[in-house]
Image: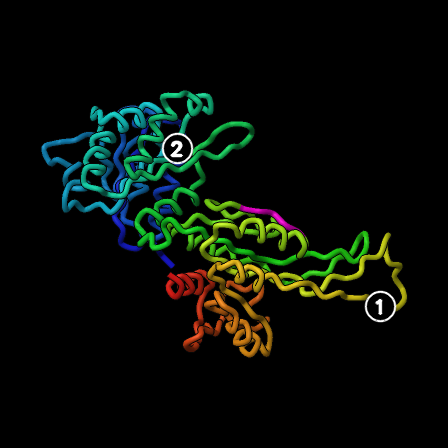
Amino acid sequence: MKRLNNIRIVLGVCGSIAAVETIKLAHELRRRGARVTGIISPAGCGIIHPDALTYACQNPALTEITGMVEHVKYCGEGGEADLLLIAPATANTVGKIACGIDDTIITTFATTAIGRGLPVVVVPAMHESMYRHPAVRKNLETLKEFGIDVVPPRMEEEKAKIAGIDEICLYAERAVSSKKLAGKRVLISGGSCREELDDVRILTTRSSGTMAKELALEAFRLGAEVTLVMNPMHGIVPCVKNVPVITAADMHEAVLREADGADYYLSAAAISDFAPKRVDGKIKSGSAVSVTLEPLEKLITRIAAKGVKTVGFKLGRDAEEEGLHLLEYDNIVLVLANKPETMGSPFGEYVFLRKDGKETVCGTKDEIAGKVWDVLA
């Protein structure tokens, strides 16, 4: 799904060494459907050549304001741009934007965009000690007060580095979305749990966590503050709070803790229904073994009882019947019933069960996630 389809983005490049990543960023934005025009400051031209930006954007890169008043054409009232994305943004440029100083093409575009109310995303790139400077921190806060989205750096090798391309693109998608979840807190549990049988063996499921990840990403795009409770073996999801868990007990504890203040809870995890009675040591192989499975408490009804709007998932041949039973509880507003074939697959067929009816929805899991939020929000 190309969420930036036909979105016109002006991509500003400042004089940071991180500008070398902008070529890849421009390509990725275009892969997601955006039409990109690059603008580059004089300092940025010392890092990458404007021709490289022209090639990446497939539009002529702009290096100065001319008699064509390009800043008005793109970012002024009725202008062509849908988003101004400055990546990388230096401390120098951040300070000038915060103070309304226009002395480069980047800062002039920024002032025009802010005055128009155009969505602006700023991706700072600077040494970590610069982030700690009181004036820089104040300037970044000023940008946020202007309504600008500031993409935080990633810490790697004990150094602050520009955010990854996926994160930047997600912030761009968020900036041009409907933001119908703005101000909402979303809690999602996903993936499999692992219950120890002995010192070596575990019991688990084939859940990949794909559905939970797509739900979390879509909620972020729509403006929510998102917490994802999931086994880290399924990967870390960018732009959301990741809470790592392993067992069903871990997941119960984390979800109950994070549920305070949540507006929505989506129980997309294959939480263990049973835990084996653990055996000390390693069960010897070569002979038949009996395993005692002890039932575990249901989590979804406990969260719904807290007054949180809750979405359940039911898997199996009798999933619809079990899903209808879940809808009898207050605050469980939607249940997605599906079959085991969806586990680990990027595609799925789900029956959306609501108190007022049902419908079948097929597609990729990111498309399914979009439909879930269409129904809820």
Residue type (three-letter) at the residue carrying disc 2? Val
At x 69%, y 60%, the residue is 204
Taken as a whole, is the magenta stretch helix, strand or loop? strand
For residue 290, which numbered disc appears in the image? 1
Q: Which of 159 and 140 is in front in this view?
A: 140
Picture layout, residue 318 above or below residue 6: below
Q: How crowded is mark 1: few (under 14 residues within 10 Å), some or many (20 or more)?
A: few
Image quadrant holding the N terminus, namely bottom left
* 1 vs 2, front mark: 1
Picture layout, residue 39 above or below residue 251: above
- Region of the chain picked out in magenta, as a range: 242-246
Residue that carries the numbered disc 2 in the rendered image: 20
Q: Residues within 10 Å of mark 2 (few under 14, many from 20)?
A: some
Residue 127's quadrant in the figure?
top left
Residue type (three-letter) at the residue carrying disc 1? Ser
Residue 226 percent across, percent down from the top left: 47, 49
Figure disc tally:
2
At x 54%, y 46%, the residue is 242
For residue 244: magenta? Answer: yes
